[in-house]
Image (spheres, rainbow, N blue to C red):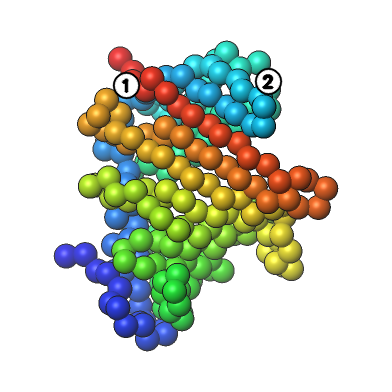
């Protein structure tokens, strides 16, 4: 039986391990035995458009060919790798066995989950069996993600639209502008696994860096082998 948050606020201090586990296991992940896939990749920004081909192997490594611009090449490969790594299915206890999960406040975004143990300092929010906010310390930076809408695959959810912001862990000062992502996923060959077909990234201006918009499209998708 899965545990979901009730409509009424959860009392602060409540142990939310089972609730967090249910939301964690509700994320869409690939079935064991993922064999990889490939297709065409298209990158667009302003009036620039570059095209190439790509493969994501069974080892989740992305190989991009045909894009000579090193920065764009790296950006395309990075999107593919970042999406793939989040599709890996890991048992809850392997990822979060050393953590504790304590309820904080409840707002429109969801009920706050205050982490203890190995993930001390991290926070999440959960609503309707979906992780709606992530606030994590990663390599000396804090990343805060708010999920605004999701795609229901029938075998778990994928984030469709969300914002991401990096900040200084000590001062809270922003490190770069807030980025808004819109991800479109499709079932490979019409049956799955679900893979990314388009990612639009819109980033706010910050300091001397102007606002920007990039589009990554992945087309003619087919399984490898």
**Residue identifier under label 2:** 69
Q: Residue at x 42, y 48 (%)?
A: 160
Q: What is the spatial separation of the Cα atoms under label 1 and label 2, in whole angstroms? A: 27 Å
Residue 85 in sight in this render? no
* x and y, in percent, of residue 24 in the image: 34, 57
Q: Nearer the viewer, residue 220 or 46?
A: 46
Residue 39 in the image: state x and y as whole percent. 42, 19
**Label 1: how many Cα within 10 Å (few below 14, some 14–19, many 20+):** some
Q: Which residue is mark 1?
A: 223
Q: Residues within 10 Å of mark 2 (few under 14, many from 20)?
A: few
SS for dot 1: strand
Residue lying furthest bottom in this view?
Answer: 11
Q: Determine which quarter of the picture holds residue 21.
A: bottom left
- Say which of 54 and 21 sits in front: 54
Label 2: element kind = loop
> Up-down: is 50 above or below 172?
above
Circle on res. 184: none
Residue at 27% x, 25% y: name it. Answer: 189
Q: Nearer the viewer, residue 120 or 214?
A: 214
Percent coordinates x, y for residue 192 in the rendering: 26, 33
Q: Is residue 21 left or right of residue 116?
A: left
Q: Residue at x 32, y 25 (%)?
A: 35
Please name whichever residue, 13 or 210, is drawn nearer the observer in this view of the structure.
210
Visible residue check, residue 143:
yes
The mark that comes first in sequence, 1 or 2, is 2
């Amino acid at each position: 039986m899965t545990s979901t948050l009730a409509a009424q606020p959860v009392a602060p201090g409540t142990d939310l391990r089972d609730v967090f586990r249910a939301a964690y296991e509700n994320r869409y992940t690939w079935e064991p035995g993922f064999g990889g896939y490939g297709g065409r990749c298209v990158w667009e920004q302003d009036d620039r458009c570059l095209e190439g081909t790509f493969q994501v192997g069974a080892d989740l490594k992305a190989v991009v060919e045909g894009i000579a611009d090193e920065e764009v090449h790296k950006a395309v490969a990075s999107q593919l790798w970042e999406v793939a790594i989040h599709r890996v299915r890991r048992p809850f206890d392997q990822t979060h066995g050393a953590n504790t999960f304590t309820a904080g406040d409840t707002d429109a975004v969801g009920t706050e989950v205050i982490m203890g143990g190995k993930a001390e300092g991290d926070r999440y929010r959960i609503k309707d069996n979906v992780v709606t906010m992530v606030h994590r310390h990663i390599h000396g930076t804090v990343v805060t993600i708010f999920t605004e809408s999701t795609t229901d695959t029938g075998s778990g959810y994928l984030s469709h639209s969300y914002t991401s912001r990096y900040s200084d862990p000590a001062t809270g000062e922003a490190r770069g502008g807030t980025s808004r992502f819109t991800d479109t996923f499709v079932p490979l060959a019409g049956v799955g696994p679900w893979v990314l077909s388009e990612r639009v990234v819109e980033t706010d201006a910050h300091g001397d860096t102007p606002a920007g918009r990039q589009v990554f499209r992945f087309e003619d998708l087919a399984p490898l082998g």
